[in-house]
Image (tube, helix red, strand yellow):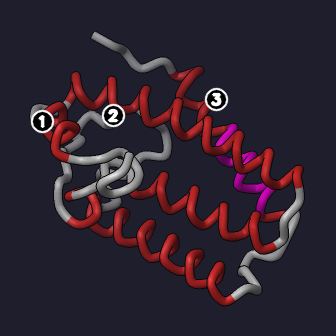
Amino acid sequence: MTRSNPLLSYGLVGVQLLCLGLIALTGPLFAQNPMLLLLEGVAGFLGLWAIWTMGLDNFNLTPDVKQRARLVTSGPYRTIRHPMYSALLLGGLALVLDAYSAQRLVVWLVLFVDLLIKLNYEERLLSQALEGYSAHMRRTKRLLPFLY
């Protein structure tokens, strides 16, 4: 059984927040390019939809499984297992592309790798804590419907 590792959990969240903060502080918060602004809006909608569907009682910033966690398979979770991570990556990418620099791209890539590590760790924990999560994994993709 995989047990939660608080140092790893908070470390992953710390890297995530640092990357998002660096992206936010090194350029505008809203893309100037209309297509990238649309992508940012879609990302915002996806993130809010995911939180709404999951419910604040089930929400957790860390990958650790809450004691009373429940499996959510509706809304965006019907097709992807980590819609909030997808939203962060899409929104962050829109901002990086809108005010591009190599440094901002590197920060986004660090965020991408961090979230991949975080979702793999989280899925190990969820598979052991929630009945039906392994079957949900077989039916859905991680971040992008029909692709990954």
Is 20 part of what is drawn in magenta?
Answer: yes
**Other residues around mark 3 within 10 Å, as few (<14) / some (14–19) / many (≥20):** some
Where residue 98 sits: x, y (%)? 77, 74
Q: Going 50% across and 33% down the picture, which residue do you hit? A: 118
Disc 3 on helix, strand or loop?
helix
Where residue 46 sits: x, y (%)? 41, 70
Disc 2 on helix, strand or loop?
loop
Q: Which residue is mark 1?
A: 135
Work out how far the residue at label 1 is from the one at label 3, CA to CA, in angstroms: 29 Å
Q: Are marks 1 and 3 in contact (CB under 8 Å)?
A: no
Amino acid residing under circle 3: Gly
Disc 1 on helix, strand or loop?
helix
Of 140 and 47, nearer the camera is 140
Q: Are marks 2 and 3 in contact (CB under 8 Å)?
A: no
Q: Earlier in the sequence, mark 2 or mark 1?
A: 2
Residue 74 sits above or below residue 134 on the image: below
Is 83 part of what is drawn in magenta?
Answer: no
**Number of numbered callouts drawn:** 3
Q: Are marks 2 and 1 in contact (CB under 8 Å)?
A: no
Region in magenta: 15-23
Amino acid residing under circle 2: Val
Q: Which mark is residue 87?
A: none
Residue 77 sits above or below residue 31 on the image: above
